[in-house]
Amino acid sequence: MSYLIRYFSTPAPKTVLVFCALLFAGTLFSYIASPILLAVAISMMLYGAMSPLVETLVRKGFSTSKAVSSTMGVVVLLIIIVAAVLLPLLFSQFKHFSERIENIDDRILNLLVTTNEWAQQHLNLSFEPVSLSQDILNGMSSKLDSVSIAISSYFGDIAFSLVLIPLITFFLLCDFRKFRNEFMQLLPNYHFELGWIIYYRTSGQLQRYLRGIFIQAVIIAAICTTGFYAFGVDYAPLLGILVGLLNMIPFFGISLAKIPPVLVVLLSDSPDVTSLITALVVVFVAQFIDATVVIPRVVAKSANLHPLTVMLAVALGGYYFGFFGLILVVPVLFSCKVIFTELYRGLRRRYLTS
Amino acid sequence: MAQDPIWGNLFRKKEGWVSVASELCALNPLFDRFTPSVIDWIVGNASLRHFKSGESIFRMGDEGAGALLLLSGQVSIQTGGKELASVEQGDLFGEVALLPDQYRTADAIATQDCEILFFLRSEISEWKENHPKQAYRLMENLAKMLSKRLLEKNKIQSAACNKDNQHL
């Protein structure tokens, strides 16, 4: 027994023990708060995005309440304007696209017949277009059913959250500091300073990363929308936003982002290789600018994780928590890494100096 | 906005230590040339902790999260079990940790039950970003305090050297 106590007072096992306790508490909280977790997560992101503006206004002499109210007012107004301008356009494009998907069987069959003819002429290869198109349609219909259920459940969640998000964001902007300080007061004296150091480092990195990927998504969406417009690809704004969102997914996003433009070109009235290459070039250019300019400046330093860890975590995050799991799994993972490293560093230093 | 958010009551009741702490801060060289409203804001965002007699407040080599102000009680500053100084009510200590990545240079142990106010670096850093002119003043005051301490230490060391030379 005394051996066990001595063993668990050494830094490594103690760190694992404390970390596991924290992880358990976090998981329990996530489970209990699961109905409003999405609203809380989005509110936290909005808080991170809006707090610099509130701080700037406070610096200019506004009171906190006035700074928060005016920031929230401007943001809500912007959302309403953007929604009023963009949503009808997006909905009409989405409706048009859905109508096209209704006669997808003819389009796929035509595409396969054309491809078969081309393959016979140039490569001396041939296949059975009718049975192949039937196989593809069967596979797609089962996948689309599950996707549509998932999408409708997401929209249900988001609609419920739309009521909560502005309220939670408002109170976070007003009182987050006080709430956080009161929460940190729960720490025992012995771990009080260490707790603050861990919080400070983790939150700093998390804020930088989330701000980074948000800027990244906006830049990619803007470049793609402009590019698709310029080269006459259908549904430019819808596709641009979709590519921007998909590009936020770590590791897999770079490949996933190319699927929507390819699909749109293939399902257009006159699918041709030039349009396909043009659409892909637009995405490539956006991703090149992202990789050379945006990522090194705003994202890279925050998430110092091994590619295999990211790949596995993203796969599991997507499997268990859907689209938001895909995006949020990396910040959660590197937050865990920072907490564990700082906890170990602090406890080890104490152990060595005691 | 709200001074007292609804969830605040869940954790602990508010105490009237802010005005006492503000008065003590106004007398401290770190807050020299600061207006009472600024001091009130800094104190209002600091964290109050209670320590029992004999409890360790921080240890040499620990990474510091901020400066501490003793509101009540007594604290002993030690290295290797030898007392270097005794901290009384209104004294500020551990202020080196207001600078990033600084480690505690001595042990601090409560010799009586204490109330200690933590001016956390994370809070001060956020405040510094929003108030650069006042932040410059705070850093200037901190530099003055540290240089004064260095001068005192040099005097003690030179006095000890002189004593040694006289013995020889």
Image (spheres, rainbow, N blue to C red):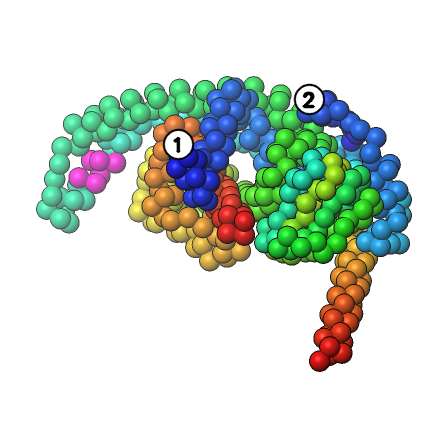
Tell me where residue A186 appears, x and y as whole percent. Answer: 63, 30
Residue appearing at x 36%, y 27% in the figure: A101
In the rendered picture of this protein, how many numbered marks are placed on residues?
A: 2
Residue appearing at x 86%, y 44% in the figure: B24
**SS state under label 1:** loop
Q: CA distance from mark 2 to mark 1?
A: 38 Å
Residue appearing at x 80%, y 29% in the figure: B15
Q: Looking at the rendering, which quadrant does residue A69 occupy?
A: top right
Q: Residue furthest left?
A: A124
The stretch in magenta equals A111-116
Tell me where residue A272 appears, x and y as whole percent. Answer: 31, 44
Residue appearing at x 83%, y 40% in the figure: B21
Q: Which mark is residue B10?
A: 2
Mark 1 residue type: Met
Instruction: Give the residue at mark 1.
Output: A1
Q: Mark 1 Cα within 10 Å, few/some/many (few <14, many 20+)?
A: few
**SS state under label 2:** helix
The one nearer the camera, A148 or B53, is B53
Residue A160 visible to an observer of this rendering: yes
The one nearer the camera, A96 or B160, is B160
Side of A352 where A317 appears, left or right: left
Query: Share a chain, discs 2 and 1?
Result: no
Question: Mostly what secondary structure, the magenta segment?
Answer: helix
Side of B3 where B94 appears, left or right: left
Where is the N terminus of chain A found, in terms of image quarters?
top left
Q: Mark 2 — on which chain does it sit?
A: B
Mark 2 residue type: Leu
Q: Mark 1 — on which chain does it sit?
A: A
Which of the two marks, 2 or 1, is nearer to us in this view? 1
